[in-house]
Image: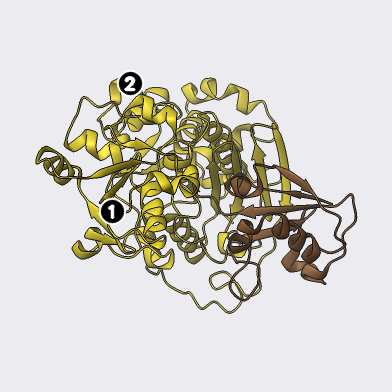
Chain colours: A brown, B yellow
Amino acid sequence: MTIFIPTPLRALAGGSKALEVSATTVAGALDELTAAYPDLKKHLFNEQGKVRLFVNLYLNDEDVRYLPQKEDSPVTATDTLSIIPSIAGGL
Amino acid sequence: MTTIADPVSLPELTTDELARYSRHLILPEVGEEGQRKLKAAKVLCVGTGGLGSPLALYLVAAGVGTLGLVDFDVVDASNLQRQIIHSTADIGRKKLDSAAEKLNALNPAMNIVKHETMLTSANALDILKDYDIVADGTDNFPTRYLVNDACVLLRKPNVYGSIFRFEGQASVFATEQGPCYRCLYPEPPPLGLVPSCAEGGVLGILPGLVGVIQATEVIKLILGAGEPLIGRLLLVDSLAMRFRELKLRKNPECPVCGPNPTLTKLIDYEQFCGIAPASKEEIKVKNGVAQITPVELKRRIDAGEDVFILDVREPFEYQIANIGGKLIPQNDVPQRLAEIDRDREIIVHCKSGGRSQRIAEFLVQNGYPRVINLAGGILAWSDQVDPKLPKY
């Protein structure tokens, strides 16, 4: 599947906008991502290993928090996972 | 949802207005009744900056009868790359005065209400209560949560837009049936994780793009036409020029708009976002890093004291203006610690003090015994010590 990396986190992911991973679940995809780029880990997960509340994960156009299997949801090669962080700019 | 009065009580259009809005009047979705709804509508625009500029201009052009503006800032040269309501001649003027003048010139019959204040928990409900719809064009997390909560408590739609570098987000929050900003982001990110536009930069046209999306949503809500961005988050990527849409759900456990709200009045949003109140003591020492003012640093340099000035900006910034420090861009610092002398006092600076504070904290963590941050950065140096130093 493809993981889209948002602008604020790209510097921690080698500058990539999108990465291909071969995992079969959302959680597996995130593990693969943070194994490749360990600096991303503290931005995505809290000390208990849970996804931080200001980070939204979307499997295609659905919020992972509202999927029946949440982070254990299965994924295929054609799915996309988007990391949507808070941004506040406006002036 | 917004409730615009029934057709009978809507204001009539004058002959001039029939001519001015003729392109609206021939649209079946607007028509004379829609134009009268626009005339009756009261919209509050929070901020008259990048998002607020196109928002206010288009709403007033469209005939929104009452437009409130909240701002307390003055126009700076660095605003003009994107804040198109202000002109070069307005530098140094209050943004409210500059904006109101342009809006009056565009459509003199409209009522422009100026709120010259920072929106706070103490005044937000009082300011928002007289409006039908709120458009959020602010630039910081505390005000985002404040606007959202006030809109939920007052049952006013919050037309949201936000930008960062080349990307934007837009949605309509706090309608009765839809989610609110807290449903999407229950918590703000920790301080310093997401840079502001002043630190991270923003493509000048991006707030234009996103502000016009907000203006479109405001108009649609007033008219009751089309499909508003309720329950949808629109993502704009201006570099790829791609628009994506994500589904938003009303969070059943939302502390402000959920069925069992725990947040029933406005709170301290600075504290909620992790911003400690700035007492005098805390200004001097921030997160374990001592702070120095430009005036004090100048005095110490002039006195011949041994200070190592570390400039953590990018090379292009150094070319625009520098105070003779050693340039090591922030991302290179971890690999170039050998060039930073542990035995000397290190004064770190950047443009406005944010990047240098993080690098100063990093140096402290790496065992540097004497690290000081230049508060306000080179911008403050230009203001307080050397006005000839170019600001950017």
Q: Position of residue B296 (x, y in %)?
A: 14, 46
Please tell me whether residue A72 is drawn above or below residue B290 in the rendered image. below
Q: Is residue A2 left or right of residue B369?
A: right
Please tell me whether residue B391 is drawn above or below residue B215 in the rendered image. above
- In front: label 1 or label 2: 1
Q: Quadrant of residue A15?
A: top right
Q: Say which of B163 and B384 sits in front.
A: B384
Chain of the residue displaying label 1: B
Q: Which residue is mark 2?
A: B88
Q: Quadrant of residue B324?
A: top left
| Residue found 25% across the figure and 30% down from its top | B92
Of the residues shown, which amino acid type is indicated by label 1?
Answer: Asp
Q: Is residue A58 left or right of residue B125?
A: right
Whether residue B86 is visible, yes or no, is: no
1 or 2: tag closer to the N-terminus: 2
Q: Is residue B332 left or right of residue B103?
A: right
Q: Which residue is mark 1?
A: B343
Whether residue B280 is visible, yes or no, is: yes
Q: Position of residue B68 (x, y in %)?
A: 39, 43
Badge 2 marks a residue whose secondary structure is helix
Of the residues shown, which amino acid type is indicated by label 2?
Answer: Thr
Q: Say which of B149 and B177 sits in front.
A: B149
Q: Say which of B8 and A43 sits in front.
A: A43
Please tell me whether residue B179 is drawn above or below residue B51 in the rendered image. below
* Quadrant, the C terminus of chain A: top left
Q: Position of residue B72 (x, y in %)?
A: 29, 44
- Say how many tags the image has: 2
